[in-house]
Image (spheres, rainbow, N blue to C red):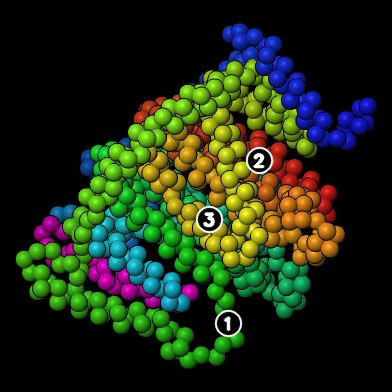
Amino acid sequence: MMEQLQERKPLQFLLLLIVFVLMCLFVPATDGSWLWRLPPLLAQLPVWINDSADYLMFEWWPVDVYDPDIEEYEKQPVMRQITRGISGFILFLIEFVRELMLGGVKTIVTFTSWDWATENQWARWPGLPWTVVAAGGIILGYALSGMGLALFTGFTFVYIAVFGQWEPSMQTLSFVLIAAPTAIIIGLVLGVWGYRSKTVETILNPLLNVAQIMPHFSYLIPVMVFFGIGDHAGAIATIIFATPPMVRLTILGLKKVPPEVKEAGLMTGCTNWQLLRRVLIPTARRDILIGVNQVIMQCLAMVVIASLIGAKGLGNDLLIALNRLRIGLALEIGVCIVLIAIVLDRLSLAWANKQTDYFADQSFKQRHKYSIWFLVVFFIGIAIAWLGSFIFKDGFNYLYLIPHNKGITTEPFWQAGVDWMWDTFFYALKGFNEWFIVDVLQPVKKAFLAMPVIATFTLAMGTGFIVGGWRSALIVGGYLLFIALTEWWDRALITSYLMTMAVLISGFIGIVMGTLCAQHKTSARILLTWCDTFQTFPSFIYLIPVMMLFGVTDTSVLIAIVVYATIPAARYTVIGLQSVPQSLHDAGSMSGVNRFQRWASIELPLSFPHMALGINQTVVFALAMVIIGALIGTDDLGQLILGSLSDRQGVGNGLVLGFCVAFIGLAIDQILRTWANKRKEALGLE
């Protein structure tokens, strides 16, 4: 009997589910009972973290620092000097790039003084005309991918300029142009180090796992304490958030380099540095550039979040517009963010896919034709801007820089559309909204909160044991134990309830959509294109339309999560079904099965590892969006993390809450990834 039970996984899951239900029914909800809730033994952990942060910033290792204001040396903690130095350097870089785009005086003041700049009014750094930046984007798009990308890039810059969003857009772009290269360099260095040292890779893997699932807000709180607030703080938080995918893809790309390529490099007498620079990195170029693409997308995903700690640009304007309930203006700004995200995504992907001809014999003019084109349009743009100073003598020079909110606006149109949607759909959907909250969400939420801690551990660790044995069970149990020993177990259950509802709905929609579209190459290509496009949208954008229809409710948050989290489920379903060999399709057809039987008996089992990874990514996307949903009102861990931003002692709370969210994701990741790997082994796919 026991041998049969061990061999039949469904029976094990059924028995586990029965035990879980019995525990939920018979374990009493008694305060003080360890079967109901564990004592918060880690309740003081945030306090210890706060005290440690304060000690590092204000007491540790005081050194003599000269203060020019009082013309004396004074004691300052070395950590404060280091972090302020880093902040000042990054802020200088951001301001430098920003003034290249928009003009200004801060870069000149850095090397002189405000008094000198005030006395010499001519000392102003001129910004590039918007026509030059737009033309440069068009040339870059054409060089990388032809006329289609060039036209789309040109449309994006013209749209931004014409609608009066040039200044905040360039502020955002300057922010990304510093954060992204910094994250790329750090990620490349760590990736190469991890490739060369197995020990380093082993250390990096758990850190990267936590970093990639940690909520956006959790990065902001320690950054504020150590680096202050402003553009530099937002950039540092963005760099931390955007570096992990670069590290992973660098390691992956270098590992995929064929051994014979490496041996050929060694045989030609390459040193280790030459082998890395001239052989390994060029061979792994595509994977590394995909990492560059992911870094840029992560940076843009942080645009709105970073504005909470002082980053200027479109994200800050979007939050202000929403706070003032100017939904029409928020939509205009949201379109700008989306267009910039899509353009940078397409440009970086085109760069990754572009093949370099190392043996082409070209003249200087052929090699540098695009640079020559840019020089030509640069001088033409300068001339046009100069002519504009005469045409628009008494007003703004629209051929140079279009001031913020001085362009065309469609805000009244969008606002009228929002009002129409509100009047037409909000009250019509109010009945559904109330029914969904009262009869669906609230009962599920109560059911989650009614789960005893022993039942939750039994279900999670039991699933881990069935899927991957004792190792998986103990890893899952370790993640849950950390959460259970904090004082936020109930809040974690609320986060889990929203995530579970969203993953079930997203997984179902994604698998159905992916299955239907995978039947035809054209529909599969269209779906993957839509997934690519929607994935470039910053996650905050998804909250705007649902708020208009359902108000500030859990329904709005859930629908936004579902839309955002469906993307990986659909994508991996299509990729998994397309990976099934054609020979197996033919064998199924020859045996007389119909299309549904072929899908259920052949395609689904073989594509299951891909689908499991898709659901895994759906969980990660859902968790990220649950925390973003705190901006429009939830009572889960995200709301507490958001509250930590305004708490002077919020570093400890923010980090521990972030770890709680990350460990929820990592526990599920452990189960799904182990399950997928087991299936791959069983199917002989590894």
Where residue 565 appears, as percent x and y from the top left, is 54, 45
Look at 69% across and 41% down and name the residue there.
672
Looking at the picture, which amino acid does disc 2 mark?
Asp
Neighbours of disc 2 within 10 Å: few (<14), some (14-19), many (20+): many
Disc 1: which residue: 357
Element type where label 2 sits in the image: helix
- Which quadrant, please, contains the N terminus? top right
Q: Is residue 565 left or right of residue 265?
A: left
Q: Which comes before the other along the chain, label 3 or label 1?
A: 1
**Picture disc at residue 438:** none
- Which quadrant, please, contains the C terminus? bottom right
CB-based contact (under 8 Å), mark 3 and mark 1: no
**Picture disc at residue 531:** 3
Q: Is residue 187 left or right of residue 6?
A: left
Where residue 372 appears, as percent x and y from the top left, is 37, 83
Q: Which stretch is magenta?
A: 116-145
Q: Picture quarter containing residue 54?
A: top left
Look at 67% across and 17% down and name the residue there.
24
Disc number lying in front (2 or 3): 3
Residue 309 or residue 156, whichever sits in front: 156
Neighbours of disc 1 within 10 Å: few (<14), some (14-19), many (20+): few
Q: Is residue 271 above or below residue 555?
A: below
Disc 2: which residue: 669
CA separation in Å, label 2 and label 3: 22 Å
Residue 505 or residue 686, whichever sits in front: 505
Can you see residue 84? no
Q: Is residue 630 above or below residue 407?
A: above
